[in-house]
Amino acid sequence: MWARRVIIGSSFALIAPTGVGKTTFGSVMAVFLAVERNWKSVIIVPTIPLADQLYKRANEYLGRASLGKAVRVEVYHSKIPQHERKEIIERLSKGEFDILITTSAFFRNEENIALLKGKINFFFVDDVDSILRGGRILDHVLYTMGIEIDIVRKGPSDSRSQGQIGFQREQRRDLSKDLRS
């Protein structure tokens, strides 16, 4: 059911007990979307150790699978040496990645936000609380998704947001038709 929601373009909260596989689902879904739809994904996790663990796990999945396409996975956080972070940012700016695994701190930097705005098809946030506690990080993540902050703040009663919501529904319908054929 979770995969179906992603494929039809629904935005939803995935609520399940610890150990059910939410994080695994997000990473497997990102790989699937990279291979099948050529989509770019961002996976936001609450801690650096989890980012590193997920990066390692994603590469293990890719090593075991014969996908017919190389999937480029990047991990970015403050514990990575500065020169390596610069190289990663360069690859991100050129679009030379399929999946970015990072922490919410990535979205504190306006240059990082501008780098990804409008380029990401799938966002997976593991532990939404870390984003909600992060002050303006939620606004920055939404902006990166292409949702203008004034629309979020005004809510659905504003006519511009109604138009944007309607447009997103049309995009989801088109995607659903593509996937069925």
Image (spheres, grey):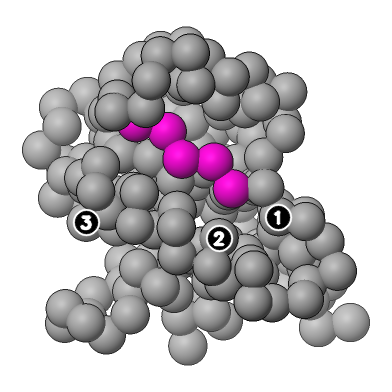
Disc 1, SS: loop
> Is residue 50 in view?
yes
Q: Nearer the viewer, mark 1 or mark 3?
A: 1
Alpha carbon of mark 3 to alpha carbon of mark 2: how far? 22 Å
Disc 2, SS: helix
Report whether 44 appears left or right of 89.
left
For the point 64% across and 77% down, the residue is 64
Residue receiving disc 2: 59
As drawn, 22 above or below 74: below
Residue receiving disc 3: 127
Circle nearer the N terminus (1, 2)? 2
Closer to us: 14 or 43: 43
Q: Where is residue 181? Give x, y as percent.
A: 89, 82
Disc 3, SS: loop
Q: Where is residue 42? Give x, y as percent.
A: 49, 46
Circle nearer the N terminus (3, 2)? 2
**Amino acid type of the residue that numbered disc 1 sits on in the rendered structure:** Val
Q: Residue furthest left?
A: 133
Q: Nearer the viewer, mark 3 or mark 2?
A: 2
Q: Residues within 10 Å of mark 3 (few under 14, many from 20)?
A: some
Q: Where is residue 77? Give x, y as percent.
A: 34, 31
